[in-house]
Amino acid sequence: MEEALLKSSSVFPYFMLVAFEAGSLSRVLVLFLVYPLTFLVSEEVGLKMMVMVCFFGIIKDSFRVGSSVLPKFFLEDVGLESFEVLQRYGNKKVGVSNLPRVLIETFLKDYLEIDVVIGRELKVFGGYFLGLMEDKKTINLTVLEEHGSDDKLGCLRVRSSDKRSWKNLPREKYPKKLIFHDGRLALKPTPLETVAIFMWAPAGFVLAVVRMLIGISLPYCVSSPLLAFTGLRLTVTTPQTTRTLVPNEPQVVQNAKPKGVLYVCNHRTLLDPLYLCFSLGKNLHAVTYSLSKMSEILAPIKTVRLTRNRQQDQDMMERLLSQGDVVVCPEGTTCREPYLLRFSPLFSEISDEIIPVAVNTHVSMFHGTTAGGLKSLDPVFFLLNPSPIYTIQLLEKVSSEVSSCGDGSTSRFDVANYVQRELGKVLGFECTKLTRRDKYFILAGNEGRAGCTTTA
């Protein structure tokens, strides 16, 4: 795999991701200090040194970095030329790597459709990785034929000099769409990027605290320019017309509904409702599916958790709308990639005044979301970025009266799907039918409730 598929010959970034995501800052520092020593020994000994630093003491059953974090970075390092050659091979493909199998198996099998993966096994004792690999095996045609088929086997290997001219594999050519991935690091931690993270982290932490204090304690008219001065970038776009968008345009008599406006957003980070408040210059009630106690305490606006009981949630949202405007993210969870998850139709039955809001973000160093980590730290990691970008675009109002759902002309699912499609068009995102449950089962092995965390 390293010699034929990936453009980069260095495996240090992938071990740094393991140390950061599955370990701790101390493990990251030790790996960074050990890495120069690997140039003084053989490649095999250097690999064993990094495996020991990254894996020693990690719980085997909770290790998910290989399936939730690394596939994204591996895919971004795949060469287009080698991938095209791989696609021309026979029906059965065997992937061979000198790396531990737990790091590469999901990437090769699920995302590159490799049938068999041959990698190094890690030794385990008492459910913990010992940081030791099995001895390196000699991979020859006999071994490959044991895992292969009756077809004639070919071996794909390239020279390092050839890789310099390779192009990156475009996203549209991925055999499987990359919709979900986890991990805090938004950049590939090469040695230079790791130095940059270490240099920025102390100042970034102080800056994040300052940003939080400004956002929590000062009114919007004062905090907005101050936050912009600290590097936070917010772009707001409002509709040019007051046209009302109505799916199927039913002619019905409006029922008496709560007077508040319901803002319906796609979900990028936990700060979506707060940034919408900054954009509008007023407080909103935020409704969320899952929120940590810490985030709930520190939030400068009123936040209310949904109970996942349809009738209770509907009554609660109607009560909030009678008190003022409400913002809801019907996806129920965040998605980092340009995709929209299925929209829960609950919002379409609540209010006569629905305004879709397209939200997008960009970060350069840290992701402000997690599936397997501490969700209370999500805002902190987002604000740790040197200059995070938020884009808010308000669309025209959508009329989705409960009476139109009741007469059969427009169902609540039609309205939810319509809003999802409109947001997808504006953002350039692809609409999917995936849900929050799909995301958390794939990335963290739980249902995504606050308090359910995965160590690695």
Image (cartoon, rainbow, N blue to C red):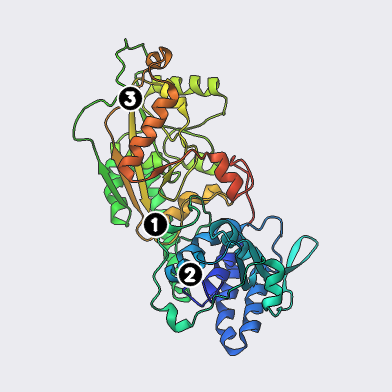
Q: CA distance from mark 2 to mark 1?
A: 34 Å
Drawn side of residue 5 relative to residue 200, left or right: right
Q: Of label 2 and label 3, which has the lower sequence position?
A: 2
Q: Would residue 23 be seen by someone viewing this image from the given angle?
A: no
Identity of the residue furthest to the bottom in this view: 40
Quadrant occupied by the N terminus: bottom right
Amino acid carrying label 2: it is: Val
* SS for dot 1: loop
Q: Would residue 352 be seen by someone viewing this image from the given angle?
A: yes
Amino acid carrying label 3: it is: Pro
In the rendered view, tell whether residue 239 sits above or below residue 112: above
Quadrant occupied by the C terminus: bottom right
Q: Of label 2 and label 1, which has the lower sequence position?
A: 2
Numbered badge on residue 247:
3
The residue at 72%/73% (across/down) is 132
For disc 2, the marked residue is 85
The residue at 52%/53% (across/down) is 181
Q: Position of residue 302 (x, y in %)?
A: 44, 33
For disc 1, the marked residue is 363
The quarter of the displayed image where residue 452 is located = top right
